[in-house]
Amino acid sequence: MKNCGSRLLAVAGIVVAGLAVHALAQAADLPSVNLGMTSFVDGLPPAGSGWYGTQYLEYYTAGRVNDNAGNKVGLPKQDIDLFAGLSQLVYQAPLTFGGMHPGLDVILPWVGSVHTDDGIGNVALNARAGFGDLLIGPFVQFDPVMGAHGPRFAQRVELQFIAPTGAYDRTRAINPGSHFWSFDPYWAATFWITPKWTVSWRLHYLWNATNHAPAASLGPDVTSTQAGQAVHANFATEYEVRPGLRLGLNGYWLRQTTDMKANGQDVSGTREAVFAIGPGAMYSFSPQDHIMFNAYFETYARNRPQGTRMVLRYVHHFQ
């Protein structure tokens, strides 16, 4: 239900001027967050309470890294190809308190492979694979509001924490781990326009703690950094075209709302932003087994790569 997104892919914007290389955007700014990993019917578990196992597979490719104005940074090449995934375990208790079910969400991200080419020997776009930061979130799932022909509205609130357990190398521009704690709570909901047509969203607000081992590219005088706060959201709409098969549109949006800090001081011109949209499909083999495919084409990126993301997701409810 989450994504290895901006932290894995937020690389340094580098301008090459003669022999000088100046970092414009810190590679370790935002952590990995959910960008497009969740989509259709997000506000309600497909088979009620119990244990769920979910496996996500993601392929991301980009041929440009944008600066603060949305222009390509001055590198000979800006190629990124990444294959990653998330392994998720969710438990929703059958107990209910006033229509609210408590639960727990645990996610382990990983980066299987990442290939970069900046045209200068990967001095700027160097990367590594490995396990990402562990995500843990207690949540409350609300009973759906029912209508004459089925559910009309369902929602969930989760207090998601991102623990700095992932692989991290301060000399790399792209790392699976962030090396700092983050708090990324969200509200997810689904509204049934008709029994076959839904609209879903998931809205996060991200807060980040201090990194006391910041990227070496910032120089020896920078001893700590704090990534800025951000708002990010997933959204989707789909229609059941035949029993078990849903087709629709899905997207995501991210906007950093405060500046990154270096040694406690704001660093202007480092706020990230991106918008993406694309087609998606969901097929339900049974009430317990579902597979989803979502494609996203990014635009309006700032201080981050701009590319294409493909997500394949399988959900199983243990009976």
Image: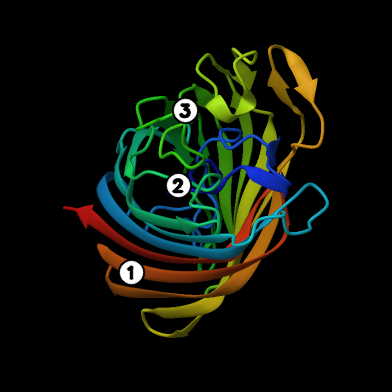
As helix, strand or loop, the secondary structure at mark 2 comes to loop
Say the numbered circle drawn on residue 2: 2
Residue type marked 1: Ile
Q: Mark 2 to mark 3: distance in Å?
A: 24 Å
Specify the quadrant of the image occupied by residue 12: top right
The residue at the point 60 percent across, 14 percent down is 224
Residue type marked 2: Lys
Look at the numbered discs 2 and 3 and tell me whether their residues touch, using CB distance below 8 Å.
no
Tell me which label, 2 or 3, sits earlier in the chain.
2
Q: Position of residue 269 (x, y in %)?
A: 81, 37
Closest to the observer: 186 or 114? 114
- Mark 1 or mark 2, which is nearer to you? 2
Residue ID for mark 1: 291
Residue ID for mark 3: 170
Residue type marked 3: Arg
As helix, strand or loop, the secondary structure at mark 1 comes to strand
As helix, strand or loop, the secondary structure at mark 3 comes to loop
274 left or right, relative to 178: right
